Image: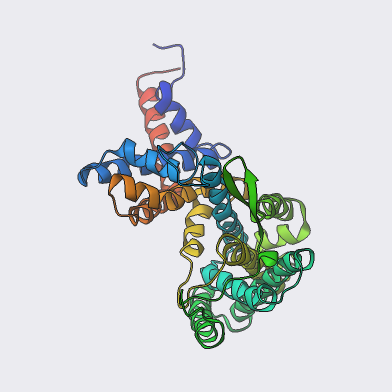
Amino acid sequence: MKAKNQTTPNGLIGKMINALDDERLSQFAIPIVSIILTIIAASVLLLVLGKNPITAMNGFLRGSGFMMKPLYAGGQSMLTDFLSFLGILAPMLLAALGIIIGMKSGMFNIGMAGQMLAAGFIATVFVGYSGLNAYIAKPLVILVGITAGGLIGATIGFLKYRFNIHEVVSSIMFNYITSYIVAFFINTYYKDIITRSSRICSPASRLSITGIAWGSSKLTLPLGIILAIASVFLVKFLLDRTVIGFEMKAVGLNRDCAKYAGVNVGKSIVLAMALSGVFGGLAGVTYYVGYFNSIVPKELASLGYDSIAVALLGNISPIGAIFSSILITIFQKGSIYMSSTVGVPKEIASVITGILLLFSACGTYMRYLARRQRERLAEKAKKEGVQ
């Protein structure tokens, strides 16, 4: 006879099982387990390719500015790499916030890349080529991003509510429509004959401050990261503390019940997709008029799809999206340096992101396995007469 009730194993495994089966702790445990499993799977993949996983992971970190490189080119340093990392982190986080708002409302905005492109192109044409001074141009770029992305998102939401056109179908179609329309205008009116992409924006309109001298380094300070971090807390407040957020989440959980409770379902759907598009538009201007300075015709940013992985890994939480976006951006940003030093194709970063997305999507199954394990151990303990 044992005096202590033991329904889970002792040690780290037991604590992890408890965390996975706990409603509050699972939002942290599932992403951690997903990351661990992804690292293991990626290490096995790299070993199969004949590469050292530790060297490859160091390459990702060095390429993102989290570790020192052996050598730096003139004007470059670890700080320039880290600021560049923050520059691409901002649109990743903003796009993930748009995905989260949609998912909380029961909608899947897979058209984030198209909304980014539309906002970036319109801001480039109307503000980037305008010659306005920075005090007017930069806020105007943000306003254009909010408007362009919000209009596309609202249209997708309206089509869903009024005509029951699934948002995945309509948002994908908007991706194609936007891509070809933007490509037509760039190739016809705004093409740089040397780079074959759009002409660059004026420095005053870019959401970054360039040419900052820091010792021997020339720094570019991304303003988008400030906007992204502020947006995280704005979205969290919206979802947790406002009537609008409550209604959107109610519609996402059960539209029939929400309608019965007096929620205007149509309004919530359109508003949710409009807000999702707003953050897609903000992601677009921080990407095309911030991190980059031009647009390549007929090319949608893979970041728009990577943000889905960020949202899922972050457990559909604005705060969780901060940490998941950092992790996935490390893989994407550091892939070029890792590829050049380790000799692995940089596309391996997309493979790792895909593996991470796969494990993140298995969060419900992980909780199911943890619960089954606890039930089995409890039944076994009962049979053995554990008190």
Residue at (36% x, 47% y) in the render: 338
Residue at (45% x, 31% y) in the render: 16
Q: Taking the image as drawn, is residue 315 in sight?
A: no
**Residue 165 picture quarter:** bottom right
- Residue at far bottom of view: 188
- Viewer-nearest residue: 289 or 279: 289
The number of callouts visible is 0
Q: Taking the image as drawn, is residue 377 in sight?
A: yes
Residue 19 falls left or right of residue 278: left
User: Residue 306: image x %, image y %?
Assistant: 47, 59
**Residue 56 picture quarter:** top left
Q: Is residue 8 above or below residue 217?
A: above
Residue 336 falls left or right of residue 207: left
Q: Is residue 319 above or below residue 192?
A: above
Residue 108 falls left or right of residue 140: left
- Viewer-nearest residue: 59 or 173: 59
State which quarter of the image contains the N terminus.
top left
**Residue 9 picture quarter:** top left
Q: Is residue 206 above or below residue 214?
A: below
User: Residue 41: image x %, image y %?
Assistant: 31, 44
Q: How is the image coloured?
A: rainbow
Residue 110 falls left or right of residue 137: left
User: Residue 94: image x %, image y %?
Assistant: 61, 58
